[in-house]
Image (spheres, grey):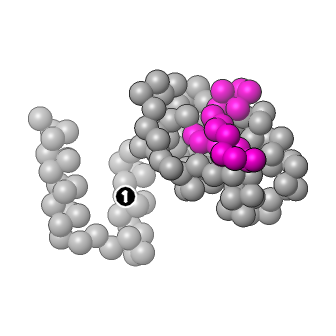
Amino acid sequence: MSEENSNDINSKDVETHLTKRERQILDALYQLDGGSVQQVLDAIDNPPSYSSVRALLNRMVEKNQIKSKRDGNRYLYFPLNNKKAAGLSAMKRLVETFFAGSTTDAVKALLGNDKNKLTNEELKTLEKEIDKLKE
């Protein structure tokens, strides 16, 4: 169901105007690559009622934060931005919020996590990316 829209709106505009619950719903839609009210409900922790999720999804459509598509007798909801653009926006917010804007501190935190042991191939890929930045 993943769709890459050539008319992507600025993800920063959408993502800065989300409530906590709307962010939770949008995150679920990215994980699901789009979904129905019930799928979103099943994907989020401590969800509100079905009718509340439906109302939030419809409000997000009205606010141009997501899009909907009729599928038989139900609607499916999709993020407007592609997953990569949303990921970059989320990473920027994470670095700004938790690492005072320091990319170095964020990378060190990621690399220092024992759960994320990098393979030699992954290390070589990172080295190449760092070398590109030096040029």
**As displayed, is residue 91 above or below residue 48?**
above
Helix, strand or loop for disc 1:
helix
- Asked if the magenta segment contains residue 25, the reply would be no
Residue at 83% in and 41% down: 55
96 versus 9 height, above or below: below
113 lies left or right of 130: right
Residue count near mark 1 (Cα–Cα under 10 Å), binned few <14, some 14–19, many ≥20: few
On the image, the x and y values in percent for residue 64 come to 66, 27
- Taking the magenta stretch, the answer to whether it contains residue 72 is yes
Q: Is residue 25 visible?
A: no
Taking the spot 50% from the left edge, 50% from the top edge, the residue there is 1
* Nearer to the camera, 123 or 22: 22
Q: Main secondary structure of the magenta part?
A: strand
Disc 1: which residue: 108
Residue numbers of the magenta segment: 61-79
The reply to whether residue 69 is in sight is yes
Residue at image x 58%, y 49%? Answer: 34
**Of the residues shown, which amino acid type is indicated by label 1?**
Lys
